[in-house]
Image (cartoon, coloured by chain):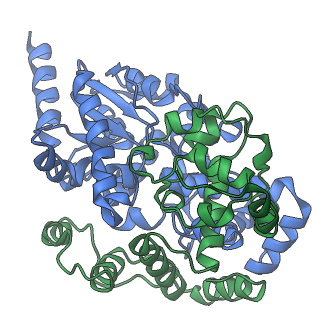
Chain colours: A blue, B green
Amino acid sequence: MKYAYYPGCSLSSTGVEYDISTKKVAESLGIELWEIPEWNCCGASSAHLTDHLLALALPARNLAIAEEKGLDVAIPCAACYARCKATEVEVKDSKEMQKTISEVIERQYTGKAQARALLDVFVNDLGLQSISTLVNKPLKDLKVVSYYGCLLVRPPRLGFDDAEDPQSMDKLIEALGGTPVDWAFKTECCGAAHATTKSEVGFPMIEKILTAAKEAGADCIATACPLCMSNLDMRQTQVGAKYGKNYSLPVFYFTELMGIALGLNPEELGISKHFVDALGIVKKLNEAAGRRDTA
Amino acid sequence: MERIELTAAWAEGQEVLAEVTKESGVRASKCYQCGKCTAGCPVAFAMDKTPREIMRLVQLGLMDEALQSQTIWLCASCDTCSTRCPREVDIARMMETLRIIAKRKGFVAEKKMDLFHDLFLKSVEKNGRVHELGLILGFNIYGMQPLKDAHFGPSMLLKGKLSPLPHTIKDNGEVKKIFANVRKRGGKL
């Protein structure tokens, strides 16, 4: 299995551990990722609020490079994925748009190279059965709420999962030996950049999600988006201080949880880069596994 | 409550309404005002007009009121409204288009948000990728809040989550050309 790989800007900075864990896990699973050389920013989430054509043209250049290579594109970041998917679909739907875009980017893109969410690739192309056979450190008794965020499964006509009650990440957690916990905030928006640009709007949105996860009885949150991660992890203490709450809720990229279950070293997966300590819970998992082995 | 003369407003609003409809591909007349968009909107609590009200203003041709609202800037583009609309109206696309047109007409109800997106795209045009540290520093300086979130800086740098210098891609001429070609076609960037 081989895909073009589009990490996107956040994965080389604030979301660097998403990039690290994606590459390590893909390697363990035998999936080859060909990083698009000299890829550019897809414009999320500023271009589509400024100019519709620019919003389609920026992702199109990356998709065109993948198309030349004859590969579909695996995309970890939910926001990048949404913008790339929107471009693919508009180009496919309209010959006129295809022509316009090709003129603007000065490359050919016909919509043949598809934008694929990394989660979709793992769950539906590789399959849960194959993944579960490779698990050697199951996430036993780890209660995880899957936080898909708003962009990964929308709009419904383009999605690989249910837009209101998606299941793929929950099933993945189960295949990794963990306990998926149902909750009502799977696709609720975290406010994206609002926490930075207008915190009086962004912070309450983050607060609701963290509180819901806590009330659902989760040990941790699994996410598929670097901006969701920043909001829920980096800002967790800041938001908690504002609302007088202490959530102490580790947040993982789903790829990190996969890496742990596949037996990779948590430090090497980048888990020490989180703001809310997430290594502690991994250590506890390993200790419990050790006790089970000796018992 | 302020009285609104609907007949005159309807005539006045037609030109902008046609522009919004053409650019968004969304027919506001399909909306039957059930309010499901507003019920599910995670940002409705902070808006000056609810998404349903914006749709009604557009239906009535009261375009200036829609374009001057904070709502179109506060919309987080999460698509919950469009996903749930029983009439399949793409409300999020409508919000996005209203915002683009509002900016073109000089109605910017949320200056800081506008600044953030401008700086973001400048960074992309210059380097091919967004330089997050540069974006945040620029946002704080131009937004006159130099120390906002500054406490995250040192640990972000230590964790290797922020790069002091931008990464400029080799083929950046191509990205600059994309911006230039969009401008040639009338894009106001």
Would you place residue A200 above or below residue A286 in this image? Answer: below
Residue at x 44% of width, y 52% of height? B47
The image position of residue B28, as x and y in percent, is 75, 48
Quadrant location of the C terminus of chain A in the rendered image: top left
Residue A211: quarter of image: top left
The image position of residue A66, as x and y in percent, is 68, 63
Nearest the eye: A110 or A80: A80
Nearest the eye: A234 or A11: A234
Residue A42: quarter of image: bottom right
Q: Is residue A198 left or right of residue B42?
A: left
Would you place residue A12 above or below residue A287 in this image? Answer: below
The image position of residue B2, as x and y in percent, is 55, 55
The image position of residue B123, as x and y in percent, is 46, 82
Quadrant location of the N terminus of chain A in the rendered image: top right
Residue at x 35% of width, y 56% of height? A20
Would you place residue A108 above or below residue A145 in this image? Answer: below
Q: Residue furthest top?
A: A295
- Specify whether residue A112 is in view: no
Q: Residue furthest right?
A: A95
Q: Is residue B67 left or right of residue B25?
A: left
Count of numbered circles in the view: 0
Residue at x 58% of width, y 80% of height? B106
Would you place residue A195 above or below residue B168 in this image? Answer: above
Q: Is residue A170 left or right of residue A92?
A: left
Residue at x 39% of width, y 57% of height? A19
- Specify whether residue A144 is in view: yes
Nearest the eye: A180 or B47: B47
